[in-house]
Image (cartoon, rainbow, N blue to C red):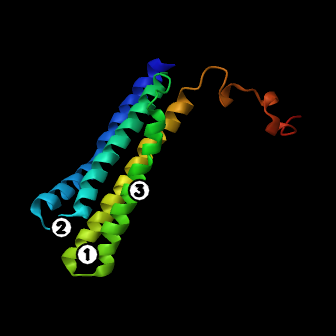
Amino acid sequence: MGSVVGPAIQRLAAARLGRGFLPVAVLLLVGLSEMIGGRRAGAGALLLALGALASAGAMLAYGLGAAQRAFGVPRKAWWPLATAGGLVPLVFGVYVMGWRGLRLIARWDGVPSVAAGAAFVALGLWTLLSWQRIAELETLASVMTLEEGKGPETRSDSEDPGREGEGGA
């Protein structure tokens, strides 16, 4: 079971994490540059940097949990924390997209402001999409590692109550 599925899920998790870290890394760099540059140093820059780090950590924990599940390793004690931490990338992506992005566009302080707002909207959406793809790994790992005899594909048509009276001669 784990000999084929485990490595496949592990490679998929690594690929999705690699791509998923790109928008978070860009947002981390923007937050750090705002803090160091002093241009917008304050709570917004700190929230951007810390939110990016927390989102990356949540994505990593969730991806690792899905890969472990694919290898048949039972869930660890930290899994409920990783599941609850799954809200961090969602909230962070909505914050970046809505507050940092759409708010800048709505203020319409000129072309640079609108361009920065559009970039924040794109990065926020990219973060949300990346999180969705990483969260799908848990479902994929659960479905692909069903134990023999427990999955729906092992049932015959005569055992399926929903198929009574269909077809037949």
Q: CA distance from mark 1 to mark 3?
A: 22 Å
| Circles 2 and 3: CB atoms closer than 8 Å | no
86 horizontally vs 149: left or right: left
Which quadrant would residue 48 be assigned to in this image? bottom left
Q: Look at the image and tell me whether residue 147 can be seen.
A: yes
Q: Position of residue 143 (x, y in %)?
A: 56, 32
> Mark 3 is on which residue type?
Val
Q: Which residue is mark 1?
A: 114
Q: Position of residue 66 (x, y in %)?
A: 45, 32
> Mark 2 is on which residue type?
Arg
Q: Look at the image and tell me whether residue 129 can be seen.
A: no
Q: Is residue 87 above or below residue 151?
A: below
17 horizontally vs 164: left or right: left
Q: Is residue 151 above or below residue 132?
A: above
Report how many numbered discs are placed on residues in the image. 3
Q: Which residue is mark 2?
A: 40
- Near mark 1 (Cα within 10 A), the count class, few <14, some 14-19 or many ≥20, is some
Q: Residue at x 50, y 32 (%)?
A: 141
User: As rendered, which of 31 and 105 lies closer to the eye?
Assistant: 31
Q: Residue at x 30, y 80 (%)?
A: 107
Mark 1 or mark 2: whose residue is earlier in sequence: 2
Element on which disc 1 rests: helix
Which quadrant would residue 118 be assigned to in this image? bottom left
Q: Position of residue 151 (x, y in %)?
A: 65, 27
Q: Which residue is mark 3?
A: 91
> Mark 1 is on which residue type?
Val
Mark 1 or 3: in front is: 3
